[in-house]
Image (cartoon, coloured by chain):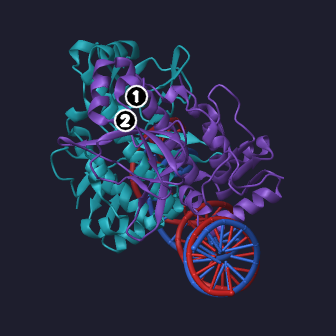
Chain colours: A cyan, B purple, C red, D blue
Amino acid sequence: MLTNSGMPDPGFTKPPRESLMPFSADALEVTQRRFEAQSELMLLGRPVSSVLFLQEGWAIACRSLRSGCRQVTSVFVAGDLVGFPPIRRGDMFRSEISVYAATELRVAEIRLDTFQQAMALEPVLSQQMLNHEIRLSAMLQERLVSLGRRSAQGRTAHFFLELAVRVSQPDGPPPDRYACPLSQYIVSDALGLSAEHLNRVLRQLRLAQLLQVRGGRVDILNRKGLERLADFDPDYLYSD
Amino acid sequence: MLTNSGMPDPGFTKPPRESLMPFSADALEVTQRRFEAQSELMLLGRPVSSVLFLQEGWAIACRSLRSGCRQVTSVFVAGDLVGFPPIRRGDMFRSEISVYAATELRVAEIRLDTFQQAMALEPVLSQQMLNHEIRLSAMLQERLVSLGRRSAQGRTAHFFLELAVRVSQPDGPPPDRYACPLSQYIVSDALGLSAEHLNRVLRQLRLAQLLQVRGGRVDILNRKGLERLADFDPDYLYSD
DNA sequence: CGTCCAGTTGACACCAATCAATAGAGGTGG
DNA sequence: CCACCTCTATTGATTGGTGTCAACTGGACG
């Protein structure tokens, strides 16, 4: 039996993926920053002046409606570029999303103007940013399929299968066990479900010996079964 | 009373938006092509060798699940770049989505390698492609909010309010009336609803004097009311 | 005149939201 | 150390929105 606190967290200790770290740290004046859990990294519509590269911890992008309910549109893990690119509005750049730290974060910050200059000078960097955006679009599209056409169980299965790939090394197979510090409230807002119902779904999946989510740890008990349930095809997560 | 067939279609006759036509036609060897309604422009995972710029007609991107149900993830109107960029897989480029013509289409086709060369030579073009992707991501994200957290009525209202902006000129106000040749089957698959339920929702909106969708034409009867219902803020559709 | 397809309507079932309540873990301060 | 609080997780009862199944309409077209 594993203790569920204080252990080294595989999601945290893995090195960032090179494919998503498309710049040389020295060349670009990187500032190391920390954010505490629950803090706000960017707010929808607010001017942004830097690019954030997530090195450690988990963050979420979300949008809230007037009614008070919110939709988590992205989960960011170590290795991800956060909230890039911003949307240009006149001579300002404004954030397209609100981003919050789900855990304590370690972040590399690069000034946006510096970054843009580098992109102008280095077509390769532009191309890589484009690739980054492609991957992002692909993930958003897959989430759209989840919310639109998958059952609550299917969505949940899909969510944790995707995360397994994303926290793994890009060249290795996805792990059957990984750390995930997201609360059920966050996950339910990502899946468009109520927290109560997500809880019930997780119980069903656990009883069906498919998936166990508990104490900040995810255990994929039956990958084949989960993949069938979720209609999961990880192709969209890989590109060069 | 307007007839609903054979009339010049405002969605078709408007010129393409310059902001999304970021290349000079002569410089890039553009081939004009036509597709008939229901034909397939690209198929998920298939190699793609060209970039398609939609000049006239409506197209949809969709994904199907094993169960047979499908999710429409994007609607393309005149002025849109279709299915760009593809995902790189080894030395091939593969389509990330399947795209079908909802009506007869007129399309400008540019060979992908030519286009890539142009992007490498012209940082401006790269930047514009990045902007294109940003806008796409913003729309996908907004759809995610719709499917996750808006009611069937809210989603439907949001869908037609967004389309109004997208078929309008970028500098002008969105029209209160526009042509939309999408069947209720397509719309329902875009909204994650059953066709029957969408039909009921449309009736409710019509009876509430908010929105009328009939005979390939959309009438926004009460924009303020619709916007309130949909929690619609068009900011995400505009960028420079 | 028959066929086909999009649109429409009704009856019914069911999945998931809501409301309400409790339990457990972690933190804080007395 | 314990009392108290907050936050997350959990469970039950009930409601309601939406899907499903089925049937029918109307127009377009041969």
Pointer 1 residue: B130
Q: Residue at x 38, y 55 (%)?
A: A159
**Residue A158 rendering spot, x and y as whole percentages:** 37, 58
Q: Quadrant of residue B5?
A: bottom right
SS at circle 2: helix
Q: Amino acid at mark 1?
A: Leu
Q: Are marks 1 and 2 in contact (CB under 8 Å)?
A: yes
> Looking at the image, is A140 positioned above or below residue D9?
above
In the figure, is residue D6 to the left or right of D16?
A: left
Pointer 2 residue: A133
Chain under disc 1: B
User: Is residue A179 visible from the viewing direction of this image?
Assistant: no
Chain under disc 2: A
- Which circle, 1 or 2, is nearer the viewer? 1
In the figure, is residue B67 to the left or right of B87?
A: right
Mark 2, residues whose alpha carbon is within 10 Å: few (<14), some, or many (≥20)? many
**Residue A123 rendering spot, x and y as whole percentages:** 27, 21
Q: Quadrant of residue C1?
A: bottom right
From the viewer's side, name the closer residue of B94 and A104.
B94
Q: Residue at x 40, y 24 (%)?
A: B26
SS at circle 1: helix
